[in-house]
Image: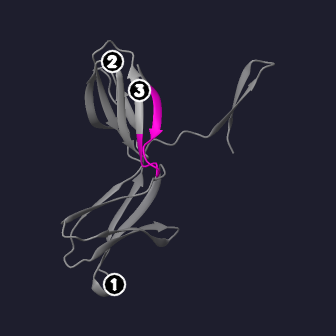
Amino acid sequence: MVTYDSITKQDAAGSTWLVKGSSDQATPVTLRFFVDGLAAGETVSNDGKFEFVLSAYQDLEVLDRSCQVPRFDSPKRWTLYWSVVDGTLYYRIDELVSAVWTERGRVSDLGQGHFTFLTGVLEDVTLYDFRVVPVFAGDLEAAAIPFSATAVRRPDPPAVTYSYSAGTGKVTIGAAS
């Protein structure tokens, strides 16, 4: 069994985290790392301990037995990907929010040929529409490149409260408001 011992913020913005943990399997043990359900590395640990740097909003799963299969998972964020539109100065990325196109970011065209943009965290079972708008000199815009899909991911854990009664010895778990 893998135990996660600590998760420590690595930068002020909280965009990377250091996860430390250990395995109870006989050493040396092969540890396989999965991020958002995809293989992210493997290491052989002589003491059963591990460290892994993780980006914010990613789910980490560490397996310590060769027969284990990772859980199905889908990322909480999408990476939009598109090809160059000749003459573009930059690409504006918009998201449709309450029937209004809202700018979410800009990507400069520095001649790279292909472009990516990482969205914010997406809610489970929700339809999302994004568009990438090529912008030319003089703020002229070309036809938007559309992206549309329903996000399906592992839902966030529910918010709960806990209380303990010394008199009855019972723990009460309730929905947080």
x then y, percent, for residue 107: 31, 68
Residue where numbered disc 1 is placed: 139
User: Is-magenta flag for residue 66?
Assistant: no
Residue where numbered disc 3 is placed: 21
Say left or right for 64 vs 162.
left
Mark 1 or 2, which is nearer the eye? 2
- Amino acid under label 3? Gly
Q: Which of the two residues, 49 or 128, is positioned nearer the viewer here? A: 49
Q: Which element carries disc 1, helix, strand or loop?
A: helix
Query: Looking at the figure, which quarter contains the C terminus?
Result: top right
Which span is picked out in magenta? 4-17
Residue 134 versus residue 130 in the image, above or below: below
| Badge 1: residue crowd in 10 Å (few <14, some 14–19, many ≥20) | few
Residue 78 is drawn in which quadrant? bottom left
| Badge 2: residue crowd in 10 Å (few <14, some 14–19, many ≥20) | some
- Amino acid under label 2? Asp
Q: Which element carries disc 3, helix, strand or loop?
A: strand
Farthest right residue in view = 167
Q: CA distance from mark 2 to mark 3?
A: 11 Å
Residue 71 versus residue 156 in the image, above or below: above
Residue where numbered disc 2 is placed: 47
User: Is-magenta flag for residue 13?
Assistant: yes
Q: Earlier in the sequence, mark 2 or mark 3?
A: 3
Colour mode of the rendering: one colour
